[in-house]
Image (cartoon, rainbow, N blue to C red):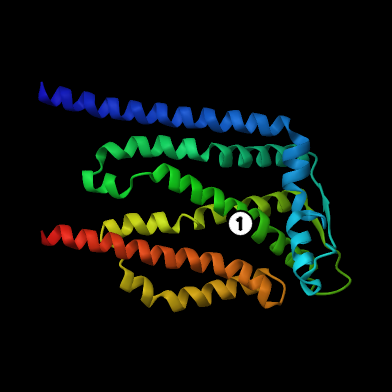
Amino acid sequence: MEEEEKEMTVIDHLEDLRWGVIRSMIAIIIFTAVAFMATEFVFGVLILGPSRTDFWSYQILCEISDKICIDKLPFTIQSRKLTGQFTMHIAASLTFGFICAFPYVFWEFWRFISPGLYISEKQVARGATFFVSLLFALGVLFGYYILTPLSINFLSNYQVDPSIINEFDISSYVTTVAMLTLACGIIFQLPMVVLFLSQLGIVTPALMKVYRRHTIIGVLFFSALITPPDIISQCFITLPIMLLYEISIFISRIVNKRRIAKLES
């Protein structure tokens, strides 16, 4: 009897996982369908926005200083495949759908794993869905309004020879925008990742302080590659990421103190 009950419990657990995945997929599909129908806004305004000089980020840079004003983007976007525009329309809509559905998708994931956590772990991770969703949204906005336009400006102006004209394929452009935006959404999860790893004792404040110099050098090198050759543009990339790193050290310090105090008690 006990084995049958245990087996049913496992089956029920897997059934719950299956329905969680199904509900998450439905949420993504709904937002994807909405984005697919709103072509003029999603594709014409959001996706292609960073390819135009009247984009909000470029206007802000011009207001800050004439030296970093971006008033020219020397490239054109083309579709060289018969199915190119249709395929990229679906890809862009799917990306938009995933971004919009992310809070619900994570909530389903968290709802599935939270019963298996200890009470102390649940207390540490209280409000995880809210903070993960908030950090993801901030990362997406940072990637879209800061990292993407600076990267597009750098790549469109980069030439190994003046005779080579930059004519980018629509698939390359959409993929670049999507990857940069989603990558920032993931990078901004650093504080939450450190929170859980610190709770497990894998990450400590001392360890993060040791690798702080390496992180600064890595971020500076990365920002120098994708931004114009000026200190202001590099700060736009470096400062938010390093701020997240310092916040993560602070979070790790608090979690480790609580973990050590619990072990000693």
- Choose top left, top right, bottom left or bottom right for residue 30: top right
Residue at 26%, 63% in the rendered image = 256
Instruction: Tell whether 50 sits left or right of 135.
Output: right
Instruction: Tell whether 5 sits left or right of 83.
Output: left
- From this viewpoint, is residue 188 visible? yes
Which residue is at the front of the view, 157 or 63? 63
Residue at 22%, 43% in the rendered image = 119
Q: Horizontal and vertical percent for residue 109? A: 40, 38
- From this viewpoint, is residue 118 visible? no
Vertical side of 72 occupied by 133: above or below:
above
- Choose top left, top right, bottom left or bottom right for residue 247: bottom left
Task: Give the residue at the far top of this rendering.
Answer: 1
Q: Which residue is mark 1?
A: 142
Q: Horizontal and vertical percent for residue 54? A: 82, 55
Vertical side of 12 occupied by 198: above or below:
below
Q: Horizontal and vertical percent for residue 133? A: 48, 45
The quarter in which the C terminus is drawn is bottom left
The amino acid marked with disc number 1 is Phe
Which residue is at the front of the view, 16 or 263? 263
Instruction: Tell whether 111 sits left or right of 158.
Output: left
